[in-house]
Amino acid sequence: MQIGGVMRVRLVTATPEQTAAEAIRAMLEAGVGSVVVTEGNAPVGIFTERDVLKLAGTGVSFGSIVLRDVMTPNPLTITAEDGILAAAQLMGERNLRHLPVVENGRLVGIVSDRDLRLAASLGESRSTRIREVMTEPVYAVNAAEPVDKVARAMSERRVGSAVVV
């Protein structure tokens, strides 16, 4: 099974200049455990629940710190054609829960350890590709769009996230 068969394409993304508080709100609203930090449509970092816990331990104000300063920069990525077994091994070796999926340097999805467990439970982990299970199309918005407008559109489209480009 290829990563394209299990990845999610309804992504939660943010820019490096957004605050940790904004990223946390986005994760909570979408019910996900990570935000892919992008410049253009290229992943430059990832901010996860683990990062939130690390920050909480320092007592820093989430609203006063930008993602660029607290994200994991240059995250490992995979492609939609990669196999889920290889992805699971990489995630296990590196103690990762989320892997951005890219094509030609462009963010197209994300796969989590949860996604891989689900795929494995289906018994097709060796032959299914991400492309076979991903959701399309991606809902993308401009960073200048008002949040209330994006939230309404997300509700109308019944999607849990918007990719900010």
Image: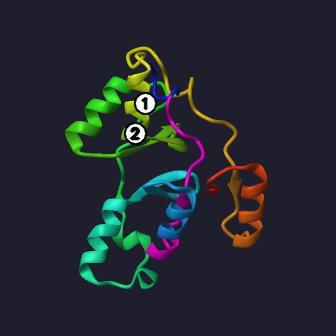
Position of 161 compared to 50: left or right? right
Mark 2–mark 1 CB contact (< 8 Å): yes
Q: Bounds of the magenta span?
A: 6-22
In magenta stretch: residue 14? yes
Position above or below: 74 against 145: above
Residue occupied by mark 2: 114
Position above or below: 6 against 127: below
Foreground residue, 102 or 60? 60
Position above or below: 142 against 80: below
The N terminus: image quadrant = top left
Residue furthest to the front in view is 121
Residue 77 bears which disc, if any?
none
* Residue type (three-letter) at the residue carrying disc 1: Leu
How many numbered circles are shown?
Answer: 2
Name the spot of residue 48 as percent of width and height, x first: 38, 59
Identify which residue is drawn at 38% across, 16% down: 126
Residue 118 bears which disc, if any?
1
Identify which residue is drawn at 27% across, 69% down: 54
Q: Gap between marks 2 and 1, in whole Å? A: 6 Å
In magenta stretch: residue 55? no
**Crowdedness near tag 2: few (<14), some (14–19) or many (≥20) residues, C-alpha within 10 Å:** few
Magenta region's main secondary structure?
loop
Position above or below: 40 against 149: above
**Which image quadrant for residue 26?**
bottom right
Name the spot of residue 61 as percent of width and height, x first: 38, 85
* Residue type (three-letter) at the residue carrying disc 2: Arg
